[in-house]
Image (cartoon, helix red, strand yellow):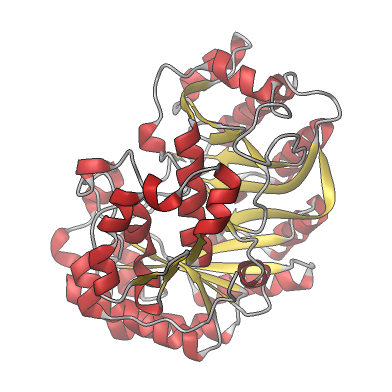
């Protein structure tokens, strides 16, 4: 694997030409392909046979796990948010939810063998995980450790809202075993914050970062969003300058996907307040220039990291992976997910839990796994997943490696896909060599569009509005 250069070419004309709607490929097949005929019995089968059923060549017998907990509660609503969340100030609701999470933990692990319990990655997402009280945080981690063994040196992360977190909370998170933190910022511009109903000061944000470092967190990541209402190039530049000054280990600069037909809170955002397409590109170009100048490495899509960060190292060593939390250093884990709407990846399957509290509680009251839809991957899915992963994580694909692993003739099997890549090749986005496909610096920002060429299930609905724009 060729080491990734940190050179990134941002060409607005190229972006405009290839900026189509498409999946983010946190999984393949993507979640919109999950079917309702995959239910609790299917999920139970894959849990039982996790160590014998394979997800492709070389995947049998894996033992270590990744755990995800969806904690949906938020005190207030952010208008841009597309997550499955519940707006409340009532901690009675979270107390009940934690009791049912404990039931689901017991139910899922009941299908595993007792020794099948090693966890090297754990993530609390939301919603707002820090909605939980200190006692509730202790309760959930105790329930987790009752069933699983969190390995020394594992990656244990949490999403944090700095508006609701003080230094004592950060200290507790460190004591519970968390060593990585993702902090939502989006934009420090007051006009933007008012427009999206998220008022958050620089001081409270940076206090949390200082506390994380004082309590031994190995990595602090900051999330930003471009394309929000009232956003300007100059305003976002000021935000970036303040963020870069505190030197986070990682940054994510996400594209705001305005889909008010799918997400009700976004209906409170006026179309007239959104930056134009050209303004969005100017904001993104400025962000890339600022981050590159500050020494950050472009990991892929919307992620940047310091050169000595684990993500950058994993990419250079060919170990980078993508899952439902984004880029990861743990490629060989099955993911067990808990809570409403969470998605598990076990063997050659994906399955998602029911989306409402009532459904979730009813399933668990009857001791039934809350999975309500999913998919079993066929051999072609597994192959295409590996190709999409390689392109999105390493910007390079070895045809020889694919042929050796999967027993195919690459150019014959993917003849239509190679033809589809022709226009992108002519535009300088990629180079198809005799035995390799290389995503060039011009193509790295829109690697999603390149990956789409290998998505057999996407076909004619590439412009379907359920997907966000690539840029």
Q: Quadrant of residue 271?
A: bottom left
Residue name at image x 47 percent, y 19 percent: 38
Q: Quadrant of the N terminus?
A: bottom right
Q: Where residue 191 sits: x, y (%)?
A: 30, 72
Q: Where residue 22 sits: x, y (%)?
A: 30, 52
Q: Where residue 294 sits: x, y (%)?
A: 53, 89
Residue 417 in sight in this render: yes
Q: Nearer the viewer, residue 257 or 183?
A: 257
Residue name at image x 20 percent, y 42 percent: 460
Horizontally, residue 151 falls left or right of residue 409, namely right
Q: Where residue 210 sits: x, y (%)?
A: 69, 75
Residue name at image x 63 percent, y 23 percent: 46
Horizontally, residue 56 falls left or right of residue 236, namely right
Q: Quadrant of residue 15?
A: bottom left
Q: As drawn, which residue projects farthest toward the bottom?
A: 293
Q: As drawn, which residue projects farthest toward the top?
A: 366
Horizontally, residue 294 falls left or right of residue 114, namely left
Label tally? 0
């Amino acid at each position: 694997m060729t080491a990734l250069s940190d050179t990134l070419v941002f060409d607005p004309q190229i972006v405009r030409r290839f900026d189509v709607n498409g999946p983010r490929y946190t999984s393949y097949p993507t979640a919109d392909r999950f079917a309702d005929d995959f239910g609790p019995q299917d999920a139970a089968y894959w849990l039982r046979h996790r160590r014998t059923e394979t997800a492709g060549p070389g995947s049998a017998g894996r033992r270590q796990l990744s755990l995800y907990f969806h904690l949906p509660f938020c005190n207030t609503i952010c208008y841009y948010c597309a997550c499955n969340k519940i707006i409340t100030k009532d901690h009675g609701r979270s107390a009940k939810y934690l009791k049912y999470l404990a039931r689901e933990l017991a139910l899922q692990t009941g299908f595993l063998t007792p020794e099948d319990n090693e966890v090297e990655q754990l993530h609390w997402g939301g919603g707002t995980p820090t909605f939980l009280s200190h006692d509730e945080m202790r309760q959930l981690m105790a329930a987790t450790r009752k069933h699983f063994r969190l390995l020394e040196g594992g990656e244990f992360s949490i999403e944090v809202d700095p508006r609701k977190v003080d230094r004592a909370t950060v200290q507790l998170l460190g004591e519970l075993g968390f060593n990585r933190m993702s902090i939502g910022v989006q934009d420090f511009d007051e006009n933007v914050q008012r427009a999206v109903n998220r008022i958050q000061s620089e001081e409270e944000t940076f206090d949390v970062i200082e506390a994380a470092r004082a309590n031994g967190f190995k990595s602090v990541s900051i999330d930003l969003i471009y394309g929000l209402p009232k956003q300007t190039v100059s305003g976002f530049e000021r935000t970036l300058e303040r963020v870069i000054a505190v030197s986070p280990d990682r940054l994510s600069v996400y594209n705001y996907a305005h889909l008010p037909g799918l997400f009700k809170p976004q209906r409170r955002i006026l179309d007239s307040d959104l930056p134009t397409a050209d303004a969005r590109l100017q904001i993104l170009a400025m962000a890339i220039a600022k981050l590159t100048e500050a020494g950050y490495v472009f990991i892929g899509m919307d992620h940047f990291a310091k050169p000595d960060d684990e993500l950058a190292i994993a990419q250079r060593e060919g170990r980078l992976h993508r899952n439902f939390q984004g880029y990861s250093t743990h490629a060989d884990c099955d993911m067990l997910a808990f809570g409403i709407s969470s998605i598990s990846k076990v063997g050659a399957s994906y399955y998602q839990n029911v989306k409402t509290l009532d459904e979730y509680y009813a399933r668990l009251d009857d001791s039934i796994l809350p999975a309500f839809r999913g998919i079993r991957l066929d051999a072609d899915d597994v192959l295409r997943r590996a190709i999409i992963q390689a392109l999105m994580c390493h910007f390079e694909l070895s045809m020889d490696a694919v042929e050796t692993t999967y027993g195919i003739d690459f150019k014959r099997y993917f003849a239509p896909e190679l033809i589809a890549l022709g226009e992108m090749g002519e535009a300088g986005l990629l180079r198809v060599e005799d035995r390799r496909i290389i995503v060039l610096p011009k193509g790295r920002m829109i690697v999603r569009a390149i990956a789409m060429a290998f998505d057999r299930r996407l076909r004619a609905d590439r412009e379907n509005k359920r997907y966000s724009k690539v840029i």
